[in-house]
Amino acid sequence: MFRKLTLTALVTLIFIAPLWAQRTSDVPAKHSSYLRQASDGIKTLQSWYTQSTGLYQTTGWWNSANAITVLANYSRVSRSKAYLPVFTNTFEQAQRTSSGFLNNYYDDEGWWALAWIDAYDLTRQQSYLAMATSIFTDMTGGWDSTCNGGIWWSKDRKYKNAIANELFLSVAAHLAARTSDPADRARYLAWAEKEWSWFANSGMINARHLINDGLDLTTCKNNQQNTWTYNQGVILGGLTELNKVAPNPTLPATAQSIAAATLTRLTDANGILHDTCEPNCGADGVQFKGIFLRNLMALNSAFPNPRYKKFTDTNAESIWNNSQGPNYEFGQVWSGPFNAGNAGSQSSALDAFVAAAQMNSRN
């Protein structure tokens, strides 16, 4: 027989059960809401897409790689196949601008390599992974002994900076995780570990656990230049991926310390992420913050942290409520007000919506 419930237990059940149901329903509800917002924003992003070039009007070459990346991530999180033809078209048409997705800048090459890795993860189309492999091979040519290692920012060999080397690390680690050939896996892993060993000792990670822009070549020391948000982001994805291939507790620990420093030091009193260039960040700076959110999503997938989810929700909600213009255009200052949108600021904001949707998913 069933035992009779005490009055206290019955009252508790009556009042607590609805609250429990509400809490458990919040996650899928927010997931769906962020996906709807991302869907609306992506339609606007695609209004700047040019079929004949495979690139995006109103923004640059490397920004287009990031737009393709957010399109792939949205497709994965939403399980949509609507944009698969875009990847095919860009893969073919954009090479008319730069054959093999190669140019004078190693960081540009890294963005395209990661874009095609994301497209491969979504479609399993081997040509995308092969392209990323080819791009990485070109990037290895940027490594030399200046300042004891690392790759150059450009083929002019005048600056060694954080972003090019973070991308080099991330591409190497991603390829190591995806190749089926043991020799290739060992080679990519060796490059990733070599890069990380150099980067960790380069001095670019400062005492506040933030990453400055690059090195002073006269001293080979931290040049103390800006701690851009994207420099705090790419390293999170790179270290997370490297840890999957070659687990080492220092890798996620370092990523987590950089993430924590970013959430503490590069945000305003309301927890909204900012770059110091705002509100006039030019064609490049408008892209930076979304890159941080994208890589925080990767770190959170491997090492979930309620603080990351709260931060991502806060920023996505602020963009929607405070930095939205007509036709679902999103601006560069996420705390608002909206000033103007372009494909760079749009894809950056979409990174935040996709990350929020993913972090609120039960899958």
Image (spheres, rainbow, N blue to C red):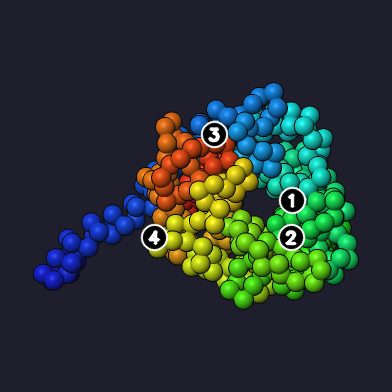
Judge by depth and name the residue closer to the eye, 154 or 34: 154
Q: Mark 1 or mark 4, which has the lower sequence index?
A: 1
Q: Which residue is mark 4?
A: 270
The answer to whether residue 27 is above or below residue 250 is above
> Sequence-wise, which precedes: disc 4 or disc 2?
2
Quadrant hosting residue 217? bottom right
At horizontal 62% and vertical 76% (from top left) the residue drawn is 207
**129 displayed left or right of 142:** left
Q: Earlier in the sequence, mark 4 or mark 3?
A: 3
Rendering quarter of residue 201: bottom right
Mark yes or no: residue 196 visible.
Answer: no
Residue matched to label 1: 107
Please report contact status of discs 2 and 1: CB closer than 8 Å, yes or no.
yes
The answer for how far apart the CA atoms under marks 3 and 1 are is: 23 Å
Local crowd size for mark 1, using a 10 Å CA cut-off: few (<14), some (14–19), many (≥20): many
Q: Residue at x 69, y 23 (%)?
A: 52
Query: Dot 3 lies on which element?
Result: helix
Nearest the eye: 316 or 184: 316
**Badges 2 and 3: C-beta atoms under 8 Å apart?**
no
Give the residue type at disc 3.
Leu
Helix, strand or loop at label 1? It is helix
Q: Position of residue 298 (x, y in %)?
A: 58, 57
Do labels 3 and 1 touch, CB within 8 Å?
no
**In the structure shown, which secondary structural element does the residue marked by tag 2 occupy?**
loop
Residue 201 drawn above or below residue 137: below
Badge 2 local density, few (<14 within 10 Å), some, or many (20+)?
many
As shown in the figure, which amino acid type bears the numbered disc 2? Answer: Asn
- Can you identify the residue that label 3 sits on? 45
Position in image of residue 349 (x %, y %):
51, 45
Sequence order check: which comes first, mark 2 or mark 1?
A: 1
Q: Mark 2 highlights which residue?
A: 161
